[in-house]
Amino acid sequence: MTKWLLVVGVLMPLYSAQATQEPEAVYNRVCGACHAGQLPNAPRRGDQAAWKPRLAQGMDTLVQHVTQGFKAMPPRGLCMDCSTEDYHAVIQLMVSKPGP
């Protein structure tokens, strides 16, 4: 019995770990609603001039703004199933690649 508890205790965190989602899919599902130009203060995807001062704050600050909410951005950017890694990947996508 003790061995089974040990196995479950070791494997449970691995089972609940969240896999990184496809950044393009997350952007299309959640982020594009605001970052495709609908909100004037949300930097558009691929707009280097708009992203430059934000990137200067550092990726950790940007991820914190997304997770906690910042100005008009709601907490978690309304992506309730996104991980920190997902936010990093989507921010990189929005910075480097212009939208369709």
Image: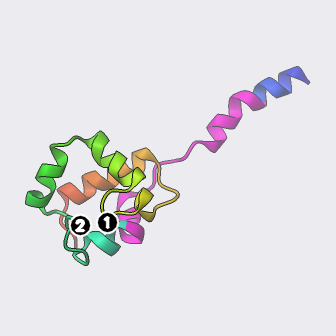
Residue 87, compared with residue 45, is above or below; it is above
Residue 79: percent from the left, percent from the top?
Answer: 46, 61
User: In the orientation shown, which residue stands out farthest toward the bottom?
Assistant: 38
Give me the disc on residue 42.
2
Query: Where does residue 86 sit, x and y in percent of width and height?
Result: 41, 51
Quarter of the image where the C terminus is located: bottom left
Q: Is residue 28 above or below residue 38?
A: above
Q: Can residue 88 be spotted in the picture?
A: no
State the image coordinates of residue 72 (x, y, percent, origin top left): 31, 66
Up-down: is 70 above or below 19?
below
Q: Residue at x 31, y 40 (%)?
A: 60
Left or right of residue 97: residue 32: right
Residue drawn 24% across the image and 59% down it: 94
Amino acid residing under circle 1 = Ala
Residue 72: image tag: 1
Whichever of labels 2 and 1 marks the residue nearer the N terminus, that label is 2
Total count of labels: 2
- In the rendered image, residue 87 lying in the magenta stretch gets the answer no
